[in-house]
């Protein structure tokens, strides 16, 4: 097992109170598999990614649980161990293409820096490797592009460059946090294809964090649905999307217009608003918006239990099965 | 019952602060009460002078006495009005928190900033009430040989200067000069600068180009030498100094406001205002200026400090307010020669200057932190 | 192209070119944001305008309301050439066509209460007398599905979806015949997007308002638009009934978009 996360909790300590961004997440990622973490903005999924690397920004921090990567517990690791994990163990690609790129250095130099650091190549070798990697990312004229600055590249190319930096140290796990959200539809396709190809060629595991169901269907074998800091449904992507059990997953799938899904009819959607993570009531956080919930859902957040071949955190779904 | 409780509070509101305390608004109640007590205390302590001042022909005496009366009346009026307003609102549905209220709350949580407000208000109060408060006549010279360079004592809390004049009284009158010039010069600079910059920034294009080139020309003048020149030509009284300081400082504000407006103009809520058909003056006044106001407020606070410092510097060099009219700047200058013999002559005005400058800087810092727009948005996930 | 009697908005040969580069008097070149566009939106229909970033769709959306001055071409609203209108006439004409912006976090003035935001157009155009304003504001809030207590809130106290509803209510306050919706759901959460789309569909059903719906999402366009135009680099490459364009796309760019949106599966 490449990555084992148990009861991960990351809180933000603000003047207004404690914001529970991640509250008891447990999941595994095997070597070579693609897993998707799905949720809307404000559910804490980006903080999950940052927790895996030990880079949660203050005033937040990981307050509990463990993240075992390749034998090292990232939550309790020393700075030296963490440096080994970051880059060479786990790489990360963010949403804004180019936000991860330093605007005052050329793209080639940034890739070369990582390669030199983690793979011990000389400067010459690193520069050549940078050009090679850019070519692998299907960037045309990589020698020219390596000398370019981030602002001279288009959004799609910047994202490819960011991916090149992330994979240049040959990480075993690549985290992609909303890698295609800020890009045009045609470019999205290309980036997803690229990620898939890299995953196969390098044998990496891929953890894709997104709110876009279409992206998940494309790329992931397994999916984890997140709501208000907790997982509510986990299982095979195909099964979960064909037959969603948790009311949030159902609502989410009903909110997304799909091509061929109907004309001029209102979308099903989910009523209400995403909850404020500062002010979560006890019990199930989805209750205010849930068509199935009632008073029995107010005591404790439901645990993930196996239902119909996947895990689901909903009392009503379990009750329906067992009665 | 709620109703009778409220009418009860309203009646008590005639004593400033009491009404608020009854309604549970402790902070405001205490402030009002303390202010009233302070002012009444001054009135009681200086009753004779007050009566004399009311009937005096000297303008500043009369203003001081009037201010005292107006102050008390104002406190009473505000107390009643505010209690009535709060009583009315108790029945209404909960109002949201405007960005200004949120900023005020954050400001109040900053103790240094709040303390500096107290210091500043106190200083300005003392300055306005100078004729009533000053223990001695700041310009009277008698028995010079016996009274010169006396060290600080109970009869002369800050000692005396080379002419035997009481330094505390001179410092109090000096406060009038320094503090009023500082405030008024800032107002002049901000008013002109904001209007000018707003027009340039809103219309953009060639209007902006022409107006900004004019500003470039003004900025290119070496300010200091310009001030020297103007002071040489005109007699250096308060009005002249206010104008000189204000007219040399407005271009900085103009440039800044113009930049803010140019960027704000593209913001979608401004486009929204245009799209509903709001005419340009309404857009500027109702939408653009309030949004640009926060940084202007902060820079205004810093600017007062700068103006006070500038006046002090000019007076110190003999180019601003000339003796015998006291200004903290020229008092420090006069004390320079006697530094080894009578340290207090330069020390106290200098300390007062330092205090007021630090106070305004802390105030500006506090305003800047409180008005920080990033605090409104919480998007970290 | 002859105009139909039910054409509410007619755009002919619209060009919007922005200069770039060069100092005061020289110009290095022109950005052709909109490069010769013909377009027609009929009464009561939702017209989808689809394109990727840089296609010019946002500029076009602004230009038909004259929030951006066109370089060439004609824009006629209900027969009236709005490009020829003077200041006051234009402001009066603005009642009939309105816009909802993409970013609900920036399109509402942060210092105004919701009731003031919605009442602003009511007062400006004297749509109801002063004592009727509160009632009308409550009606408009109800139209977009917001509870009355939101009246006293400030924008920063509300979520993105709620703010977008306020933006729609503010636009509808003037009872316009035509609404430009510029990517109105792109900045919102998925579950909230559905709510806002439903609000817009409901508006068309109840009030019969015509809309120019600008988006990059073909699935949204399929769901909500009656007719659609595809825009690429400042030009419209394909127009037609939504079903025809999506099922039988003719232009290669449209086909590429559809292929990308549908995925490999």
Image (spheres, rainbow, N blue to C red):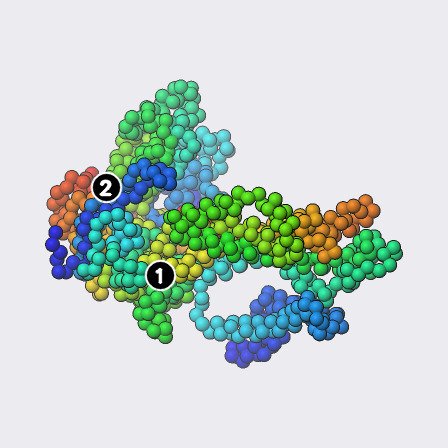
Q: Residue A34, how many percent across, how many down? A: 30, 37
- The quarter of the picture where residue C10 lies is bottom left
How many numbered marks, from 0 up? 2
The residue under label 2 is C233
Relative vertical location of residue B129 with respect to residue B159 in this rendering, above or below: below
Q: Residues within 10 Å of mark 1 (few under 14, many from 20)?
A: many
Q: Residue placed at 36% from the left, 23% from the top?
A: A129
Left or right: residue B165 compared with residue A241: right
Quarter residue C263 falls in: top left
**Label 2: few (<14), some or many (≥20) within 10 Å?**
some
Q: Of residues C199 and A311, which is closer to you in this image? A: C199
Q: How far across and how far down the image is residue B39, in percent?
A: 68, 69
Classify mark 2: helix, strand or loop. Answer: loop
Q: Decide if residue A88 is in sight here.
A: no
Q: Nearer the viewer, mark 2 or mark 1?
A: 1
Numbered circle sitting on residue B278: 1
| B101 to C18, vertically: above or below | below
Q: Quadrant of residue A117?
A: top left
Distance from Cα at disc 2 to Cα at disc 1: 32 Å
């Amino acid at each position: 097992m490449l990555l084992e996360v148990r009861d991960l909790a990351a809180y933000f300590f603000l003047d207004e109170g404690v914001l529970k961004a991640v509250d008891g997440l447990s999941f595994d990622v095997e070597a070579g598999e693609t897993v998707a973490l799905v949720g809307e903005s404000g559910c804490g999924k980006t903080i999950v990614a940052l927790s895996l690397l030990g880079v949660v920004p203050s005033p937040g921090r990981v307050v509990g649980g463990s993240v075992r990567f390749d034998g090292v517990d990232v939550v309790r690791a020393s700075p030296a161990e963490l440096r080994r994990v970051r880059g060479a163990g786990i790489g990360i690609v963010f949403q804004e293409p180019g936000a991860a790129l330093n605007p005052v250095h050329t793209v080639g130099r940034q890739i070369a820096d990582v390669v030199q650091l983690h793979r011990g190549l000389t400067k010459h070798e690193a520069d050549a490797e940078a050009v090679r990697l850019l070519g692998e990312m299907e960037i045309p004229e990589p020698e020219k592009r390596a000398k370019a600055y981030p602002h001279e590249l288009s959004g799609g190319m910047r994202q490819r460059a960011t991916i090149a930096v992330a994979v240049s140290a040959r990480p075993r796990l690549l985290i992609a946090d909303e890698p295609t959200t800020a890009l045009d539809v045609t470019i999205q396709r290309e980036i997803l294809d690229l990620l898939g190809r890299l995953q196969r060629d390098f044998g990496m595991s891929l953890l894709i964090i997104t709110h876009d169901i279409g992206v998940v269907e494309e790329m992931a074998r397994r999916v984890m649905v997140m709501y208000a800091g907790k997982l509510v449904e986990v299982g095979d992507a195909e099964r979960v999307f064909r037959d969603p059990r948790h009311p949030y997953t159902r609502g989410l799938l009903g909110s997304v217009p799909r091509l061929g899904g109907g004309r001029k009819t209102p979308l099903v959607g989910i009523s209400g608003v995403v909850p404020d993570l500062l002010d979560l009531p006890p019990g199930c956080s989805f209750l205010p918006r849930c068509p199935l919930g009632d008073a029995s859902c107010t005591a404790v957040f439901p645990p993930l239990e196996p239902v119909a071949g996947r895990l689901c955190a909903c009392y009503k779904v379990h009750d329906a099965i067992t009665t | 019952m709620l109703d009778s409780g409220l009418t009860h509070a309203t009646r008590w509101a005639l004593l400033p602060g009491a009404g608020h305390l009854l309604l549970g608004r402790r902070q405001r109640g205490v402030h009002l009460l303390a202010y009233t007590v302070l002012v009444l205390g001054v009135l009681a302590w200086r009753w004779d002078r007050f009566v004399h001042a009311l009937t005096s022909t000297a303008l500043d005496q009369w203003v001081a006495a009037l201010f005292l009366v107006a102050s008390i009346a104002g406190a009473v009026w505000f107390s009643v009005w505010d209690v009535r307003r709060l009583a009315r609102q108790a029945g209404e549905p909960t109002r949201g928190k405007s960005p200004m209220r949120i900023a005020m709350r954050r400001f109040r949580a900053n103790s240094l900033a709040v303390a500096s407000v107290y210091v500043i208000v106190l200083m300005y109060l003392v300055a306005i009430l100078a004729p009533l408060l000053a223990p001695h006549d700041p310009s009277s010279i008698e028995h010079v040989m016996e009274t010169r360079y006396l060290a600080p004592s109970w009869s002369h809390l800050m000692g005396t200067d080379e002419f035997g004049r009481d330094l505390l009284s001179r410092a109090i009158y000096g406060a009038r000069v320094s503090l009023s010039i500082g405030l008024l010069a800032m107002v002049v600079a901000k008013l002109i600068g904001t209007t000018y910059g707003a027009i340039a920034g809103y219309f953009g294009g060639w209007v902006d180009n022409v107006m900004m080139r004019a500003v470039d020309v003004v900025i290119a003048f070496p300010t200091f030498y310009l001030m020297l020149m103007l002071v040489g030509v005109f007699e250096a009284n308060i009005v002249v100094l206010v104008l000189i300081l204000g007219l040399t400082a407005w271009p900085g504000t103009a440039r800044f406001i113009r930049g803010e407006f140019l960027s704000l103009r593209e913001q979608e809520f401004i486009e929204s205002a245009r799209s509903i058909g709001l005419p340009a003056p309404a857009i500027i006044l109702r939408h653009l200026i309030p949004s640009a106001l926060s940084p202007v407020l902060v820079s205004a606070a810093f600017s007062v400090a700068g103006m006070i410092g500038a006046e002090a510097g000019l007076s110190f060099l003999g180019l601003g307010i000339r003796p015998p009219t006291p200004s903290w700047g020229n008092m420090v200058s006069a004390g320079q020669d006697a530094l080894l013999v009578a340290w207090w002559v330069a020390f106290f005005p200098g300390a007062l200057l330092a205090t007021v400058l630090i106070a305004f800087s802390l105030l500006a810092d506090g305003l800047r932190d409180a008005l920080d727009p990033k605090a409104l948005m919480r998007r970290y996930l | 192209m002859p105009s139909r009697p039910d054409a509410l908005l007619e755009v002919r040969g619209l060009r919007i070119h922005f200069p770039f580069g060069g100092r005061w008097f020289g110009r290095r070149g022109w950005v052709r944001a909109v490069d010769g566009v013909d377009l027609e939106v009929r009464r009561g229909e939702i017209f989808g305008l689809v394109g990727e970033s840089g296609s010019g769709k946002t500029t076009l959306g602004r230009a038909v309301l004259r929030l951006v001055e066109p370089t060439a071409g004609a824009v006629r609203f209900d027969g009236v050439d709005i490009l020829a209108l003077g200041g006051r006439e234009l402001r009066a004409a603005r009642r009939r066509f309105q816009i909802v912006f993409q970013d609900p976090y920036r399109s509402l003035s942060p210092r105004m209460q919701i009731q003031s935001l919605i009442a602003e157009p009511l007062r400006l155009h004297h749509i109801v007398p002063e004592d009727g304003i509160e009632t009308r504001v409550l009606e408009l809030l109800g139209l977009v599905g917001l509870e009355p207590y939101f009246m006293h809130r400030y924008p920063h106290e509300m979520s993105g979806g709620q703010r977008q509803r306020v933006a729609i209510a503010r636009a509808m306050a003037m009872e316009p015949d035509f609404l430009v919706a510029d990517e109105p759901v792109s900045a919102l959460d998925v579950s909230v997007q559905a709510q806002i789309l439903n609000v817009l569909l409901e508006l068309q059903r109840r009030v019969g308002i015509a809309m120019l719906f600008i988006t990059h999402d073909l699935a949204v366009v399929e769901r909500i638009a009656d007719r659609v135009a595809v825009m690429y680099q400042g030009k419209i490459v394909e127009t037609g009934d939504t079903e025809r364009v999506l099922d039988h796309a003719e232009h290669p760019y449209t086909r590429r978009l559809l292929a990308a949106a549908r995925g490999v599966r």
